[in-house]
Image (cartoon, grey):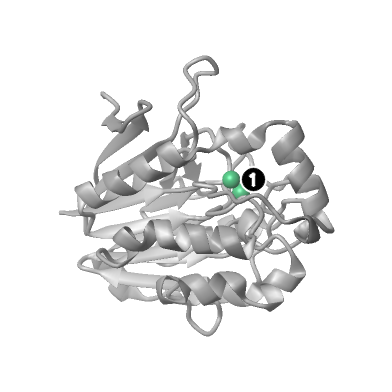
């Protein structure tokens, strides 16, 4: 039995310097301040999250992106420092989200890679892969700077995913597909919304449909409210697709919102259990049921 810990959308935040508020960050900063979104995520939840993950001592830790608010170098440093107790102690796979590659200059400077390189586990096609025990985690990175928040999986990654899933040896393993964007929208249709969806969700789904070995679990984030659904492939095979919910969110009983994360107990041949946790303002507590 292995325990996979999943967190997402922690959104560590730093106030931008005036000189950094250019291009897309003009809108982003306006959103954070005018709409009060910077209070949506808090140090208290972020600190409790790290303590909680360390106390769980996971066999594997998967972080499905949006570590920062605006991919400021200071925010990336803050995220990196905060995550140190987890990254240094447990096998970890980190994916960027759309908020972590906010600008072309940041992407060209490889700001994210410079801090999280050892935990990206990318091959030459950009597909992430981490093998531990009987578990293989594959990770797609569709985040790219653009005016909208929509993602696109580069062809090379998708072709590599198709090739990796041809490997019969994976049948003896529990295969997880991790990504920032959900493949399905709220109506369980391909999430191709041009504003903040995954533009080629249909191609990713087709790749999974054609694969010799299918992942047994899909993990994602991006939508801050947690959600579990099933990706139904044309031959009837269903793959559970889980968003554990934003993990750095402030405890807000009035709005009924808080931070959440999840633990998956898996064996080579299947998912055995899911334990969800929610932040109660002091610590993460198991959600009954
Ligand atoms: Fe997010
Ligand atoms: Fe996102």
Residue 52 visible in the picture: yes
Quarter holding residue 261:
top left
Q: Position of residue 54 (x, y in %)?
A: 25, 52
Horizontal arrangement in the rendering, residue 218 relative to residue 9 (left or right): left
Q: Position of residue 28 (x, y in %)?
A: 75, 47
Q: Is residue 136 above or below residue 14?
A: below
The number of numbered discs placed on residues in the rendered structure image is 1
Horizontal arrangement in the rendering, residue 51 relative to residue 207 (left or right): left
Horizontal arrangement in the rendering, residue 100 relative to residue 46 (left or right): right
- Locate the C terminus and report the quarter of the image it occupies: top left
Of residues 251 and 166, which is closer to you in this image? 251
Q: Residue furthest bottom?
A: 124
Q: Is residue 29 above or below residue 250?
A: below
Q: Residue furthest left?
A: 1
Q: Secondary structure at mark 1?
A: loop
Residue ID for mark 1: 190
Quarter holding residue 24:
bottom right
Q: Position of residue 221 (x, y in %)?
A: 52, 46
Residue 215 visible in the picture: no
Identify the residue at image location x=70%, y=77%.
108
Q: Residue furthest front?
A: 18
Quarter holding residue 99:
bottom right
Identify the residue at image location x=44%, y=50%.
219
- Locate the N terminus and report the quarter of the image it occupies: bottom left
Identify the residue at image location x=28%, y=53%.
4
Identify the residue at image location x=83%, y=58%.
22
Horizontal arrangement in the rendering, residue 5 relative to residue 194 (left or right): left
Q: Residue furthest top?
A: 254
Of residues 23 and 1, which is closer to you in this image? 23
Q: Position of residue 218 (x, y in %)?
A: 44, 51
Q: For the residue carrying disc 1, how many other residues have a C-alpha within 10 Å: few (<14), some (14-19), or many (20+)? A: many
């Amino acid at each position: 039995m292995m325990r996979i810990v999943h967190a997402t959308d922690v959104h560590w935040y730093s106030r931008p310097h005036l000189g950094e508020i250019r291009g897309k960050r003009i809108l982003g900063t306006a959103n954070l301040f005018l709409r009060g979104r910077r209070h949506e995520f808090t140090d208290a939840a972020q600190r409790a999250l790290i303590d909680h993950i360390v106390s769980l001592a996971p066999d594997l830790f998967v972080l499905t992106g949006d570590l920062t608010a605006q991919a400021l170098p200071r925010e990336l440093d803050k995220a990196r420092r905060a995550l140190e107790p987890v990254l240094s102690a447990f096998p970890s796979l980190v994916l960027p989200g759309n908020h972590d590659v906010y600008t072309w200059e940041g992407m060209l400077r490889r700001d994210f890679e410079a801090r999280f390189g050892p935990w990206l586990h990318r091959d030459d096609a950009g597909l992430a892969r981490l093998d531990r025990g009987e578990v293989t985690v594959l990770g797609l990175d569709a985040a790219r700077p653009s005016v909208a928040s929509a993602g696109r999986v580069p062809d090379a990654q998708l072709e590599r995913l198709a090739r990796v899933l041809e490997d019969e040896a994976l049948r003896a393993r529990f295969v997880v597909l991790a990504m920032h964007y959900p493949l399905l929208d709220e109506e369980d249709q391909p999430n191709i919304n041009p504003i903040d969806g995954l533009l080629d969700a249909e191609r990713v789904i087709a790749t999974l449909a054609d694969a010799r070995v299918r992942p047994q679990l899909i993990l994602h984030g991006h939508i801050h409210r947690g959600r579990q659904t099933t990706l139904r492939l044309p031959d009837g095979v269903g793959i559970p697709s889980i968003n554990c919910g934003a993990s750095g969110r402030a405890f807000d009983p009035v709005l009924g919102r808080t931070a959440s994360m999840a633990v998956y107990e898996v064996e080579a041949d299947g998912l055995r259990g899911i334990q969800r946790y929610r932040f109660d303002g002091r610590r993460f507590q198991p959600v009954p049921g």
